[in-house]
Amino acid sequence: MQNIMFKGKKVLILGLGLNQGGTGAAKFFAQSGAKVRVTDLKDAKTLKTSINQLKRFRNIKYILGKHRYEDIDWADLIIRNPALKPDNPYLKYARQKGKKIETDMGIFLQLVKPEQIIGVTGTKGKSTTASLIYEVLKNCKEGVLFAGNIGKSVLDTVELIQTSTLVVLEISSFQLEAFNEHKVAPKFAVLTNIYPDHLNYYKSMNDYIQSKRLIFKYQQRADFLFIRTGDEATDKPGFLKGLTGKKIYFSPKDLPKNFKPFLGGEHNKENMAAALAIAKTFSFDHKKVLKVLKGFKGVEFRLQKIYDKKGIKIYNDSAATNPNAAIEALKSFPNSILITGGVNKNLDYRDFAKAIEKYAKAVYFLEGDATDIIISNLKTIHPLREQILNLVGIYNDLEKLLQDVKKNIHAGDIILFSPGAASFNLFQNEFDRGRKFNQAVAKVFKIN
């Protein structure tokens, strides 16, 4: 299919990036026989991990450290990095030239039918919810794949998809733009929740909320929208205006009263309730589904337990890139030693500061402008808190931070790494941050 559509085409990957999307797209088009050019503002050294994955392809040319208008002139098709804002000057130029512009998700939607997609979006919990749904489906039927915003390109899975395959697709707000452009929607759409996030990209909270509505905008009457009971944003009048699919609400109350899953936290019960609602729609065996949900051990970098020795437990929640996610983590592990902070996405940290004051036993910070805001809010809540903050400090080195933590811990302590902020001042992305935290823990706490 790929060869028929793209063989001999001149394809420009505008923004290779480090999140696998650009790498997956470059690989897909190179394998399809296209002539591929890759441009990125980052240099070759920064992009080394991405470039190394494409070494075997001789039909890829790199122009790094810059974008060029001449590459846009050359291209038949432009694959843009989803993080590029619509007002990017190179995208504006491409539109003026009448160039076809897509994302990897846009190409995916040309190759996979909407009725094959179970799409999951939301501010928090979408990775865990999508993983839970995938585990349930995988154990109850054949022909199920997992793709989307999971650290690799959706195009990596295309060759494995048959006409009968169901694809569980985790979808970011940026990726939802492709659904709008192609005027399609998943047959099964799950919206976990909406909280403030990505306000460095969207002009307002309302714009961000509208971006999430795209998951059901083009649904048909035979389609389904699964939505959380009691979500402030989705409960507002007009949010579901125009919905033609069947609306199904889910809540932790849908789970059995004595249900005790391996994965803790009230927020994870919400994620399990969403998976249970999907399972009911497919009429799967109820006991079998509950067994899968009960045994689910979680997703990498999402409240992932990485250390449990000598009465000390360490959890890696690097995927918490906004304050609401970090608040939920603190509620799950009250009286924990919190490691937090990083880069702000134009978000409000007042409630997070209150949660730190209420739930954290001690707090250590990674440097960044979000950290500055959190500390400022903590001082407002409790002026004496500054004395404690001065003791624990602000760090740009995870190993040094963990060495200092280790000096002050006792049996029974829980160390919670939940940044509540973006990572791109010290790390490539939240996945890189999560891996490096695990490496630092292994070194400092001598894990073989």
Image: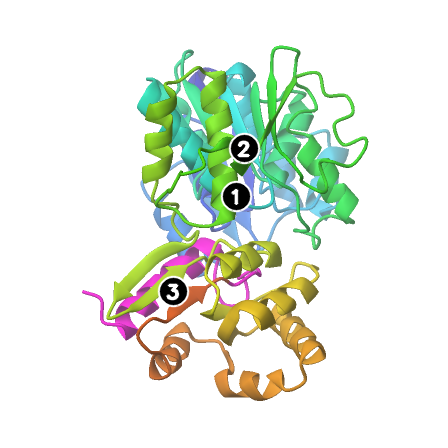
Q: Which residue is mark 3?
A: 437
Residue 282 position within the rendered picture, expressed as x and y whole percent measured from the top left: 45, 16
Residue nearest the observer in this picture, 343 or 205: 205
As shown in the figure, which amino acid type bears the numbered disc 3? Phe
Give me the C-alpha separation between circle 2 and circle 3. Answer: 27 Å
Q: Compared to 430, does 133 lie above or below?
A: above
Q: Compared to 101, does 218 lie above or below?
A: above
The tag earlier along the polypeptide, 1 or 2, is 2
Residue nearest the observer in this picture, 420 or 382: 382
Give me the C-alpha separation between circle 1 and circle 2. Answer: 9 Å
Q: Which residue is mark 2?
A: 120
The tag earlier along the polypeptide, 1 or 3, is 1
Residue 440 position within the rendered picture, expressed as x and y whole percent measured from the top left: 33, 69
Residue at 64 percent of width and 35 percent of height: 229
Residue 182 occupies quadrant: top right
Q: Is residue 296 magenta?
A: no
Give the residue at the far left of this rendering: 448
Give me the C-alpha separation between circle 1 and circle 3. Answer: 21 Å
Does the image show residue 58?
A: yes
As shown in the figure, which amino acid type bears the numbered disc 2? Val
